[in-house]
Image (spheres, rainbow, N blue to C red):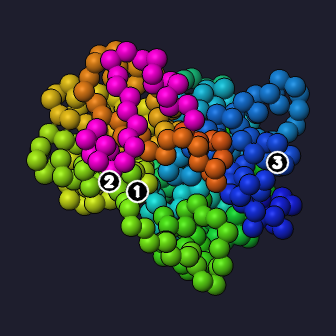
Amino acid sequence: HKILTGRRERMHTMRRLHGLAPFPKRDESPYDTFGVGHSSTSISAALGMALAARHNGSQRKAVAVIGDGGMTAGMAFEALNNAGDLKADLLVILNDNEMSISPNVGALSTRLTKALSGRVLSSMREGGKKVLSHMPPPMWELARRAEEHVKGMLVPGTLFEEFGFNYFGPIDGHDLPTLVQTLRNLSELHGPRLLHILTRKGKGYKLAEAEPVAYHGVSAFNPAQGLPPSKPSNSPTYTQVFGDWLCDMAEQDSRLVAITPAMREGSGLVQYAQRYPERYFDVGIAEQHSVTLAAGLACEGLKPVVAIYSTFLQRAYDQLIHDVVVQNLPVLFAIDRAGLVGPDGPTHAGSFDFSYLRCLPNIVVMAPADENETRQM
């Protein structure tokens, strides 16, 4: 996105002082229509823009792009539900990079999507709806369910259709001619639409294809050489100390369970997840759920540990208060990336945790000074 919107020559400055932000940023470019950093917000924001265009009598188009990981958050489904109910003129592009939810694209579904997004068939479809709207409700319902069953046998879009969206896909997101033609077709349609595209994370760069997690968010590096090796350190990081402690405690106490919202590597839980898979819960990008899940586990006598970044715990503040603190439940929050984190920018800085935690009852907030204090806490 940044390369295509006039910032190619500045890409080497990303994650550096006075350089490009690692995420879209409204005051950086007019093409960055909405600032992001946390996940799952695009559909809500685009819906707001679509409704504003409707209010202003504008022909401006609203398009939301969201990844399959972002679709694990409840907020995304709240937005889909609202958009479908309002019949908003909104296109949602689901970028499914094979990390979670879909099978590989097939020739049948690609051809079907081309047909379904074409003008002739879409006109027939809408015309059929108008004709059926004058018929008794049972006839309308029968036709609607027949269409759903036929599509449900061929494409995985029934869920989105239930939200009131016209579903198209899945198609190969790396087949640019098909993708461009489908987008052109969809731009001439109206109402809630969802295009499901399948991509491969790191496509076109073998090193990133082989290690998508390692290349998820990087600073400038020589592409011929790949990421530089990590500098060896004589002292472990707080994250490593926490991960080792968690494994030690889990060996001693079978009631200890670990929860993380899609941050296994960053929160030091790789070793724990491998050794105790039955006591490890990666809930995806669902911070609110992760906290209340921990509360439920604590109610039944288990000892939940929620490993979460400081900036992401903000997303579950009501659950922290209402479901854990007010009930005085024994939940341990291992809050990583606290304090300022320059390269990722303000959306990822852990600047507010002391402020929003110290005002709560029944909670003890601790910040270790070294490895020993980390283990003791």
Residue 356 point in image, percent of width and height: 50, 24
Q: CA distance from mark 2 to mark 3?
A: 38 Å
| Marking on residue 237 | 1
For label 2, the SS is: helix
**Is 376 rendered above or below residue 95?**
above
For label 3, the SS is: loop
Residue 92 point in image, percent of width and height: 65, 45
For label 1, the SS is: loop
Q: Is residue 240 left or right of residue 189?
A: left
Residue at 45% across, 24% down: 357
User: What residue sits right under mark 3 in the picture?
Assistant: 28
Q: For marks 1 and 3, give the one nearer the viewer.
A: 1
Q: For marks 2 and 3, give the one nearer the viewer.
A: 2
On whether residue 103 falls in the magenta region, the answer is no
Q: Nearer the viewer, residue 263 or 179?
A: 263
Residue at 34% across, 25% down: 364
- The three-letter code of the residue at mark 3 reads Glu
Residue at 64% across, 50% down: 342
Residue segment shown in magenta: 351-377
User: What residue sits right under mark 2 in the picture?
Assistant: 241
Pointer 2 or 3: first along the chain = 3
Pointer 1 or 3: first along the chain = 3
Q: Nearer the viewer, residue 10 or 367?
A: 367
